[in-house]
Structure formats: C-alpha cells, structure tokens
Image (cartoon, grey):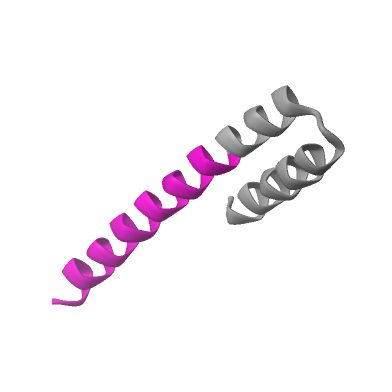
Amino acid sequence: MLYYALIFLVIAIIAGILGFGGIAGASAGIAQVLFFLFLVLLVISLIAGFIRRT
C-alpha cells in the first residue's frame, strides 16, 4: 500500500511540473490518503503485536 502512495506521489510531482493542476491535485490527494491509511494500519499492527506478546 505504501508503494501505491509513492506511485501517486510521483505522478502528482510529474503532473505538477508539466502543468496539469487537476491531475496533480487528485494524485496528491490519493497519495496522502493512502499514506495516512498505511500509517493507521502500521499503528494497529504495532499495538496488536504488543498485546499478543504479553
């Protein structure tokens, strides 16, 4: 999932450089959502790991 966030970030950067504002904004938004979703899943995984260990 982090891979997809990075892909959309690269698409947003390239589209921003080329001047496609709408595409860049949409890609950056998708990358941001995927990144925060990845962080939430990481935190849940860490908490589950600590609970399972004790």
Image quadrant where residue 47 sits: bottom left
Q: Is residue 8 found left or right of 29 in the rendered image?
A: right
Query: In the visual, does 22 lie left or right of 38?
Result: right
Magenta stretch encompasses residue 48: yes
Task: Note whether 2 is above or below 53 in the view shown.
Answer: above
Q: Residue at x 64, y 30 (%)?
A: 25
Name the residue rendered at 56%, 33% in the picture.
Answer: 29
Relative to 21, residue 51 above or below: below
Q: Residue furthest left?
A: 54
List x then y, in percent, for residue 53. Answer: 20, 76
From this view, report whether residue 19 is shown above or below residue 46. Answer: above
Asked if the stretch drawn in magenta spans residue 53, the answer is yes
Magenta stretch in the rendered image: 31-54
The single residue placed furthest to the top in the displayed view is 22
The quadrant of the image that shows the C terminus is bottom left
Asked whether, in this view, residue 7 is left or right of residue 19, the answer is left
Q: Where does residue 42 sit, x and y in percent of width and height?
A: 38, 59
Q: Please provide percent x and percent y for residue 9.
A: 67, 47
The residue located at (74%, 46%) in the rendering is 13
Residue 51 vertical position relative to residue 16 in the rendered view, above or below: below
Magenta stretch mostly in which secondary structure? helix
> 20 or 47: nearer the eye?
20
